[in-house]
Amino acid sequence: MTFILTAVLVLGATGLILGLVLYAVSRKFKVEEDPRVGQITELLPGANCGGCGFPGCAAFAAACVKAESMDNLKCSACKSEVMQQVAAIAGHAIEVGVEKIAVVRCSGSCQSRPRLRTYDGARSCAVAAMMNGGETGCFFGCLGCGDCVSACKFDAIKMDPETGLPVVDQDKCTACGACVKACPRHIIELRNKNKLDRRVYVSCVNQDKGPVAKKACDVACIGCGKCVKACPFEAITLENNLAYIDFEKCRLCRKCVDECPQHSIIAVNFPPKRVVEEAPAAPETAPVETESTENK
């Protein structure tokens, strides 16, 4: 009994001494955290999505406080107003940037792309891309397994059961870029939201030649170049049999939309165009013959 009591006392005393030593060391080498880090962290969404390039929101907040400027620091999940508050707390000035949104550049629905085979593997776009390239003849379009949905921390993407394509909720999307990184086919792109959230883009990434692309998908870009000629702002380029609209140059005139024979160019959040009805032509009247004075 005495032996057990002695052992307990020795262990208790040892633990107490080690605890005091650890407390003294922690006090001596304690690193004081800048209170601004906590203030900035509270403003951030807390999703830890990694869109800013840092492992988490706390790391991003610490980088904002330590940085000399906010030029290369941007939380894509934050609105411009929030970023201005972050910059003010960190003691920096920041320019208001253009808000962006994720855009799915594929319109190859189940009706547009015939299924040629069945994929029974893991429900992962990354795996399907490596195994057999998907179930259709298009080796560029959406695989439909929903890797982008799993990657989104803000519940801003859903798979449409009718089309088999992802749909972005423009009210929830924060343009963090997680879905862009998750897509093995690179069909998701961050584009400017523009005024009234209006966008014009080529909803196709197929780089096959026209006949091959059209056979694989009814709405595939065939690289005809009609949109390039129609654009008055030189915002459209044609490369590798695929048209691309530069959202920095595009003025949303929609002339390319009317020219595309494949309906591959999508215009979002525009009102319907007005149909101008031509006035009916006036009926032709027969000339009135007048009797000359010579015959009177």
Image (spheres, rainbow, N blue to C red):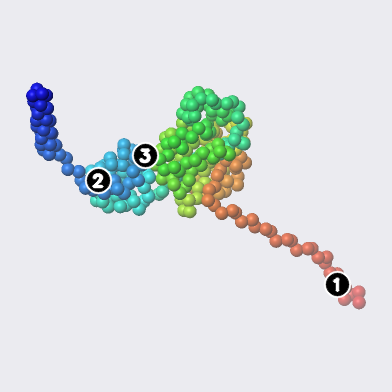
Q: Is residue 252 above or below residue 189?
A: below
CA gap, disc 1 to disc 2?
98 Å
Q: Is residue 131 above or below residue 39?
A: above
User: Would you identify the image quadrant in which residue 60 lies?
Assistant: top left
In which quadrant is the N terminus drawn? top left
CA gap, disc 3 to disc 2?
18 Å
- Mark 2 crowd level (few <14, some 14–19, many ≥20, 10 Å Cα): many
Which dot marks residue 290?
Answer: 1
Q: Mark 3–mark 2 contact, CB under 8 Å?
A: no
Amino acid of disc 3 = Cys
Say how many tags the image has.
3
Residue 137 percent coordinates (x, y):
58, 28
Residue 141 in sight here = yes
From the viewer's side, name the closer residue of 116 and 252.
116
In which quadrant is the C terminus drawn? bottom right
**Mark found first going from the N terminus, 1 or 3:** 3
Residue 69 percent coordinates (x, y):
26, 46
Which of discs 1 and 3 lies nearer the camera? The answer is 3
**Mark found first going from the N terminus, 3 or 2:** 2
Q: Left or right of 137: which side holds 18?
A: left
Amino acid of disc 1 = Thr
Which secondary structure, mark 3? Answer: loop
| Residue at (40, 49) in percent of width and height | 98
User: Mark 3 sits on what residue?
Assistant: 49
Residue 186 in sight here = no
Which dot marks residue 37?
Answer: 2
- Mark 3 crowd level (few <14, some 14–19, many ≥20, 10 Å Cα): many
Residue 139 percent coordinates (x, y):
54, 29
From the viewer's side, name the closer residue of 265 and 18.
18
Amino acid of disc 2 = Val
